[in-house]
Image (tube, helix red, strand yellow):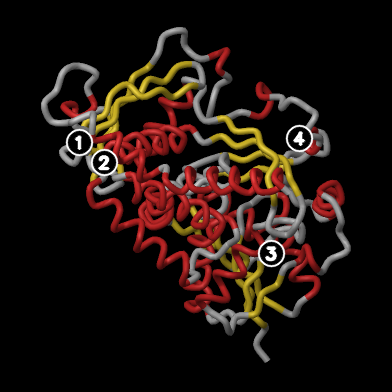
């Protein structure tokens, strides 16, 4: 009988480097590796050579950067989705785009199973597996971290050393990192104690510390069409190029560092440091434009949707019908979110420096502190009487009850 074919989500990092030999040792199988190129410039030849050396029969390196930006990053940006007020979801929405391509390759190769290197404590196992369940419910899923006897990254390093497998970490420098075009995350080691200040000079790669940023501000201008950024500094750029260029500008100004303790889906808290330079600027610019172009009721309700949207993305439910339905609502709100936003970047800060839009709802004649002939201030009295009537009734009834009790 032919050996079972297993497709492995492969990065060349510590976990997936040892999973290839582990699968071969524990299954009667052929392992096919697949790496998703999500905009970080992988060394394709080196990655393929390493996968084959570890025992894979083939290695696909799939360029999915543009799909990642247009179909995952931009919809989440338009939604204004931020998990727990800080995390811009860099790893969260990278997993479904990779898993989607995994399913496509698995079908092409006739695989009966897919495998991943996510730990049993993390969120990524859920993100990979829910995507596979949504797109290919018949595929078997193998999660070595939930099966093998290895219990730590140090033990993984020992396992690799015993088999002559080179890995990109050591026991002395053993941060768990995930990088794509949108962000770079850092977890583990000294970061596991929330009392420790991160060693920024040691870990940062996309962003400089604010202390090392220029002493003069940098201005950037972003132009949006229906909630999607299309120009940077008056230059039309393709989606991937726009984010790459803005990453360099924002990172050089110390913008985009987040240190947070977050609530993982599996029930525990974890601490991580995220670098998201372009994302931080894009979210700030998009918000300024929405404040100018959306009415109060729509804006406030969209904020409620944004929180739920962020949870769905974080929880790995990208292909859930609710996420898709909320995306349709978001798209409707973005029909007038077009215009230009100017921002000042200075030592880690992002400050608005002017916003214009043909769909602006701001009317200077109404808002002015100067004399105007379009707003009758006396009208506010009747409005306040009606708006405040429930509060007045509550207060009067409370007073009446107190009077009755005192009489008794």
Q: Which image quarter is the N terminus in?
A: bottom right
Element under disc 3: loop
Q: Secondary structure at mark 4?
A: helix
Tell me what residue is drawn at x 66 percent, y 37 percent: 260
For this rendering, which residue is in front, 206 or 111? Answer: 206
Kindly report the distance in space between the C-alpha atoms of the residues bearing marks 2 and 1. 7 Å
Q: Nearer the viewer, residue 25 or 315?
A: 315
State which tag comes first along the sequence, 3 or 4.
3
* Chain-order first, disc 4 or disc 1: 4
Give the number of the disc on residue 191: 4
Q: Is residue 407 left or right of residue 246?
A: right
Secondary structure type for disc 2: helix
* Numbered mark located on residue 55 in the image: 3
The answer to which image quadrant residue 332 occupies is bottom left
Q: Considering only order in the chain, which callout, 1 or 2, is on the residue closer to the N terminus?
A: 2
- Nearer to us of marks 4 and 1 is 1
For disc 1, the marked residue is: 357
C-alpha separation, residue under disc 3 versus residue under disc 4? 34 Å
Picture coordinates of residue 118, whole percent (x, y) = 69, 59
Closer to the eye: label 2 or 3: 2
- Residue 370 in the image: above or below residue 67: above
Q: CA distance from mark 2 to mark 3?
A: 55 Å
Residue 381 point in image, percent of width and height: 30, 34
Q: Secondary structure at mark 1?
A: loop
Q: Mark 2 or mark 3: which comes first in sequence?
A: 3
Q: Nearer the viewer, residue 226 or 233?
A: 226
* Circle 2 residue: 293
Label 4, label 1: how far apart the Cα atoms are? 43 Å
């Amino acid at each position: 009988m032919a050996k079972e074919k297993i497709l492995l989500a492969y990065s060349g990092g510590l976990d997936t480097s040892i999973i290839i030999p582990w699968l071969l040792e524990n299954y009667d199988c052929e392992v096919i590796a697949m790496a998703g190129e999500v905009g970080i410039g992988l060394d394709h030849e080196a990655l393929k050579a390493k996968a084959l050396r570890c025992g894979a029969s083939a290695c696909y390196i799939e360029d999915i950067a543009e799909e990642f930006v247009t179909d995952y990053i931009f919809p989440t940006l338009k939604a204004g989705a931020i998990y727990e007020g800080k995390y811009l979801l860099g790893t969260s929405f990278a997993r479904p785009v990779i898993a989607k391509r995994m399913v496509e390759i698995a079908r092409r190769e006739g695989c009966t199973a897919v495998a991943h290197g996510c730990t049993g404590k993390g969120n990524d196992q859920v993100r990979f597996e829910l995507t596979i369940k949504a797109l290919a419910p018949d595929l078997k899923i193998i999660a070595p971290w939930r099966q093998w006897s290895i219990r730590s990254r140090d033990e993984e390093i020992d396992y690799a050393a015993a088999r002559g497998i080179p890995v990109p970490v050591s026991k002395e420098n053993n941060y768990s990192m995930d990088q794509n075009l949108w962000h770079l995350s850092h977890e583990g080691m000294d970061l596991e104690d929330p009392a420790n200040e991160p060693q920024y000079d040691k870990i940062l790669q996309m962003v400089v510390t604010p202390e090392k940023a220029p002493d003069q501000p940098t201005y950037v201008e972003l132009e949006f069409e229906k909630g999607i950024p299309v120009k940077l500094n008056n230059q039309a750029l393709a989606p991937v190029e726009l984010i790459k260029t803005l990453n360099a500008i924002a990172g050089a100004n110390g913008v985009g560092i987040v240190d947070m303790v977050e609530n993982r889906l599996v029930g525990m808290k974890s601490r991580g440091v995220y670098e998201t330079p372009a994302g931080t600027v894009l979210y700030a610019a998009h918000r300024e434009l929405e404040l100018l172009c959306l009415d109060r009721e729509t804006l406030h309700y969209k904020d409620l949707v944004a929180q739920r949207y962020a949870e769905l993305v974080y929880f790995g439910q990208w292909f859930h019908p609710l996420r898709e339905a909320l995306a349709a609502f978001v798209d409707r709100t973005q029909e007038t979110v077009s215009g230009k936003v100017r921002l000042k970047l200075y030592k880690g800060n992002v400050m608005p420096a002017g916003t214009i839009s043909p769909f602006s709802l701001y009317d200077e004649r109404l808002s002015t502190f100067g004399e105007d002939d379009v707003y009758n201030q006396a009208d506010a009295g009747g409005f306040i009487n009606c708006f405040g009537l429930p509060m007045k009734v509550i207060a009067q009834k409370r007073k009446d009850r107190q009077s009755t009790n005192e009489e008794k």
